[in-house]
Image (cartoon, rainbow, N blue to C red):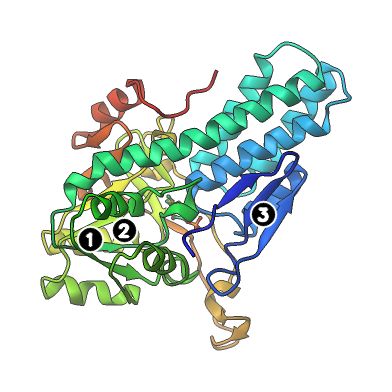
């Protein structure tokens, strides 16, 4: 069937594939207000750093369209209110705040009343959406060189087409290597507690015809020790100015294991995932997720009643454990501070706010 679009604009509403129901059901959710988009982000209907950024951009367009009959000041007030609601939906992936800030700045820089802002923000969200796909394809082109022919690659969480507006970041790198004719095999971490690997990455790789084997997160060390993993490629939710990278919980553990086995770990991410305002990983907020994700499986309680539960959604991998950061402007290598500054200043196909 191919991988369906993560999100699409339907003329006057945003339509999202419901990622909480994949792969069993392909079901679509329509959003007509920014509040509905925020709810979809909070509820993981749409997830993955770039995808929530693009969804939030459309959320801002929806807010502007809802204020079409208003004067400029009232429309801008509505946009600021929508911006706070959207940014508050999830704290770790910086693409969300980045996209909302870009759309708000675009509105502030566009003259005219609510109708003019609605038209401008709809066009701007379209531009950001299309640029995300182009950016991911560029990440794939830049990153495929790190995947040798015959490689066994381990990945964690879902950083594929579903986590973006299309093509994917970490999975995009694997996809680009596959499209270039390289043979590869992917070890897919199931990614507890939310199963993004088992449900989403495994499904995408099957659709793409890339050989893949599902493992529990705790099996990675075993396969690394046996020489069955040549490299690790993961996505990112926020990368600090020094290269420290927040990604799905379990990534840091993988990075430590990879270092212990002299296996390179690469992060693949667009420049919209860099947060130059945060000096190191210590400044990245980590989302605490609901207890039920650990205690229950498919709605049924498995964990002992009365036990305490911790459920951080992300962890931070220190820059020194990362062999390279694959971006749309090339593969960055240490020292990351200057490499990130240069990447952020470089020209590229990716979106820049106007
Ligand atoms: O909680 P999620 O599913 O939104 O977490 C997603 C991840 O951690 C991804 O690896 C990351 O956003 C990169 S997506 C291209």
Residue 345, horizontal then vertical, whole percent: 34, 20
Q: How crowded is mark 1: few (under 14 residues within 10 Å), some or many (20 or more)?
A: some
Q: Which residue is drawn at 15% across and 71% down?
A: 228
Q: In this orientation, which residue lies closer to the viewer: 190 or 142?
A: 142
Whichever of callouts 2 and 3 sits on the residue coming sooner in the sequence is 3
How far, Cα to Cα, is label 2 from label 1? 6 Å
Q: Which residue is drawn at 44% across and 71% down?
A: 192
For label 1, the SS is: helix
| Quadrant into which the C terminus falls | top right
Does the residue tagged 2 have its C-beta within 8 Å of any atom of ligand 1? no
Judged left or right of residue 27, residue 280 is: left
Residue 296 vertical placement versus 240 (above, below): below
Q: Residue at x 56, y 75 (%)?
A: 24
Give the total of numbered labels.
3
Query: Visible in this render: residue 285?
Result: no
Residue 223, horizontal then vertical, whole percent: 19, 74
The residue to which callout 3 is attached is: 40
* Label at residue 205: none
The residue to which callout 2 is attached is: 252
Q: Residue at x 48, y 61 (%)?
A: 312
Q: Residues within 10 Å of mark 2 (few under 14, many from 20)?
A: some
Residue 201 vertical placement versus 126 (above, below): below
Judged left or right of residue 161, residue 78 is: right
Residue 252, horizontal then vertical, whole percent: 31, 58
Q: Residues within 10 Å of mark 3 (few under 14, many from 20)?
A: many
The residue to which callout 1 is attached is: 256
């Amino acid at each position: 069937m191919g991988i369906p679009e993560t999100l699409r604009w339907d003329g006057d509403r945003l339509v999202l594939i419901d990622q909480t129901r994949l792969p069993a059901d392909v079901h679509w959710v329509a959003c007509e207000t920014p509040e509905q988009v925020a709810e979809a982000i909070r509820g993981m209907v749409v997830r993955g750093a770039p995808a929530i950024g693009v969804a939030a951009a459309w959320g801002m367009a929806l807010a502007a369209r809802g204020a079409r009959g208003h004067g400029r000041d009232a429309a801008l007030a509505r946009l600021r209110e929508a911006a706070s609601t959207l940014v508050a939906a999830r704290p770790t992936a910086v693409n969300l705040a980045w996209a909302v800030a870009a759309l708000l700045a675009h509105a502030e820089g566009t003259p005219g009343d609510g109708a003019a802002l609605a038209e401008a923000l709809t066009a701007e969200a379209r531009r950001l959406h299309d640029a995300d796909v182009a950016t991911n394809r560029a990440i794939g082109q830049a990153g495929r060189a790190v995947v040798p022919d015959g490689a066994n690659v381990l990945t964690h969480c879902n950083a594929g087409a579903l986590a973006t507006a299309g093509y994917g970041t970490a999975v995009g790198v694997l996809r680009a290597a596959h499209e270039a004719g390289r043979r590869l095999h992917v070890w897919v971490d199931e990614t507890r507690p939310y199963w993004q690997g088992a449900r989403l990455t495994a499904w995408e790789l099957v659709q793409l015809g890339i050989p893949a084997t599902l493992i529990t997160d705790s099996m990675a060390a075993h396969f690394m020790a046996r020489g069955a993993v040549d490299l690790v490629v993961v996505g990112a939710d926020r990368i600090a100015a020094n290269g420290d990278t927040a990604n799905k919980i379990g990534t840091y553990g993988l990075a430590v294991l990879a270092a212990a086995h002299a296996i390179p770990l690469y992060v693949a991410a667009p420049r919209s995932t860099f947060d130059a305002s945060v000096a190191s990983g210590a400044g990245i907020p980590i989302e605490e997720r609901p207890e039920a994700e650990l205690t229950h499986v498919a709605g049924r309680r498995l964990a002992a009643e009365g036990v305490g539960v911790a459920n951080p959604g992300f962890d931070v991998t220190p820059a020194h454990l990362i062999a390279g950061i694959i971006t749309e402007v090339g593969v960055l290598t240490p020292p990351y501070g200057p490499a990130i500054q240069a990447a952020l200043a470089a020209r590229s196909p990716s979106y820049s706010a106007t």
